[in-house]
Image (cartoon, rainbow, N blue to C red):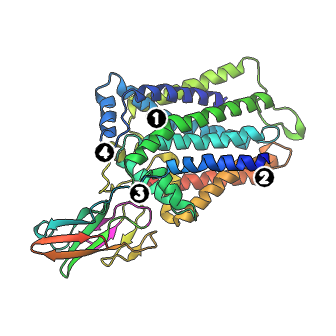
């Protein structure tokens, strides 16, 4: 009897404590970011904030490619390495190709691809 | 004896930490600036902060040396199992206090340490996602994570440390100081304690601690402090030369070479194995010569951790 009451009491106390530890719902962030096409030359890259998270836009001769810049290993922001034409993570040495696939290091998942639209001298990156 | 000197190191941390609290602001926009104010504008603020920063490193180093002495001397054997186990948890709490402490300036080191640590926790099967949300307090690393680290550093961890320290000291008082292991044939150790030698030992160790702390503070204030600790947090840019404090560098290296879940599993097994040492080494003798496998395992563990730390420092 006492044990049962104790369990109910713990549940009644534990639920609000756990709920208070969890984050409240956050307001939606902008799901797109835009830059002028002049700001990014060929074989150059820019970091942008999309959906509250870092995104990376790369300009290649074939066009633009955009990915979430959050490394799929442990969440560091990837950088563009122009000389080897790859995205790499300074934290643990993860390397990603221009299609987002893992080409080296500890990450197992590819970078998340984002939508890119280039019109009227503006490049818009959108979260899919 | 080292344990008693460790108490002095903790007292220095509490005193310097209380002074830092008077000027620190736990807000991402102002935390780095408030630490700069402490360093450059508050009278003797630089001294208090450097004592706190290097005192944390020295406290962990002392705790590791203390743990090593106790392990080699077999002083974890009955009736001192609880002393050993509480000591292991105390070491974990010390590291937790240090890690949450270097989050507070909200430097590049702070920001990326929180990001990497919480992401690694997220790899724990089933519970990972929930734990990440609890630790970060919001979807991404930001103000909530800083406030949580602040709360843990100044309230939760010190309270746990205090309670466990009291338990540890009570257990030592009940079981008595272990002293040196017996000699061959169960004879008492050759270098038995003389009256008054404990006081002298304490004075020597305490002087060594204060000398080491003064040397670090006055002559090598940046020694062992990663360069990312001197730049304000920038969520868009991970520093190229990102490294971490020496006492967690081995864990950082494990994350570099192994999948995160395996690195975490190894760390958990290491902590559990070390804590359970009194139940794994059940022989009656405390003499190192009678425990070759335990000594070899401990030496292997120390060498492995040192190697991982070295690899992490050079990578």
**Residue occupying the far top of the picture:** B196
Q: Of callouts 4 and 1, which one flags the residue occurring earlier in the amino acid sequence?
A: 1
The image position of residue B311, as x and y in percent, is: 48, 57
Magenta region, residue range: A73-88
Q: Quadrant of the N terminus of chain B?
A: top right
Q: Of callouts 3 and 4, which one flags the residue occurring earlier in the amino acid sequence?
A: 3
Helix, strand or loop at mark 1? helix
Disc 4 versus disc 2: nearer the observer: 4
The image position of residue B204, as x and y in percent, is: 60, 24
Q: Of callouts 2 and 1, which one flags the residue occurring earlier in the amino acid sequence?
A: 1
The stretch drawn in magenta includes residue A97:
no
Q: Is residue B98 above or below residue A98?
A: above
Q: Is residue B228 left or right of residue B171?
A: left
Q: Which subunit holds the residue at mark 3?
A: B
Q: Using a 10 Å C-alpha cutoff, classify the residue at mark 4 as few (fewer than 14 neighbours), some (14 to 19) or many (20 or more).
A: some
* Residue topped by disc 2: B280
């Amino acid at each position: 009897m006492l044990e049962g009451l104790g369990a109910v009491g713990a549940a009644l106390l534990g639920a609000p404590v756990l709920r208070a530890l969890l984050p409240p719902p956050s307001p939606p962030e902008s799901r797109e970011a835009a830059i002028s096409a002049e700001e990014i030359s060929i074989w150059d890259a820019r970091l942008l904030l999309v959906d509250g998270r870092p995104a990376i836009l790369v300009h290649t001769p074939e066009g633009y490619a955009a990915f979430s810049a959050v490394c799929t290993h442990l969440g560091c922001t990837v950088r563009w390495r122009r000389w080897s034409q790859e995205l790499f993570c300074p934290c643990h040495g993860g390397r990603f190709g221009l299609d987002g696939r893992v080409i080296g290091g500890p990450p197992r998942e590819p970078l998340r691809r984002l939508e890119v639209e280039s019109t009227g001298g503006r490049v818009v990156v959108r979260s899919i | 004896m080292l344990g008693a000197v460790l108490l002095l190191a903790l007292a220095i941390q509490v005193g310097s930490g209380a002074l830092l609290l008077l000027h620190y602001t736990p807000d991402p926009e102002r935390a780095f600036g408030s630490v700069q104010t402490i360093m450059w504008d508050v009278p003797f603020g630089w001294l208090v902060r450097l004592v706190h920063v290097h005192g944390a490193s020295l406290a962990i180093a002392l705790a590791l040396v203390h743990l090593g002495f106790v392990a080699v001397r077999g002083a974890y054997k009955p009736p001192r199992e609880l002393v050993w186990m509480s000591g292991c948890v105390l070491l974990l709490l010390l590291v937790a206090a240090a890690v949450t402490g270097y989050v507070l300036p909200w430097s590049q080191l702070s920001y990326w340490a929180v990001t990497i640590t919480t992401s690694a926790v997220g790899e724990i099967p089933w519970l990972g996602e929930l734990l990440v949300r609890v630790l970060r307090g919001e979807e991404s690393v930001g103000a909530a994570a800083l406030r949580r680290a602040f709360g843990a550093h100044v309230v939760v961890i010190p309270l746990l440390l205090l309670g466990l320290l009291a338990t540890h000291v009570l257990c030592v008082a009940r079981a008595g100081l272990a002293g040196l292991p017996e000699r061959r044939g169960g004879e008492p150790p050759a270098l038995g304690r003389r009256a008054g030698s404990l006081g002298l030992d304490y004075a020597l160790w305490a002087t060594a601690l204060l000398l080491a702390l003064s040397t670090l503070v006055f002559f090598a204030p940046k020694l062992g402090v990663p360069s990312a600790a001197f730049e304000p947090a920038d969520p868009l840019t991970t520093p190229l030369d990102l490294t971490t404090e020496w006492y967690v560098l081995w864990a950082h290296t494990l994350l570099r070479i192994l999948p995160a879940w395996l690195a975490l599993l190894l760390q958990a097994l290491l902590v559990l194995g070390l804590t359970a040492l009194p139940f794994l080494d059940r022989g009656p003798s405390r003499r190192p010569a009678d425990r070759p496998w335990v000594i070899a395992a401990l030496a292997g563990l120390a060498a492995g951790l040192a190697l991982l730390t070295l690899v992490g420092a050079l990578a």
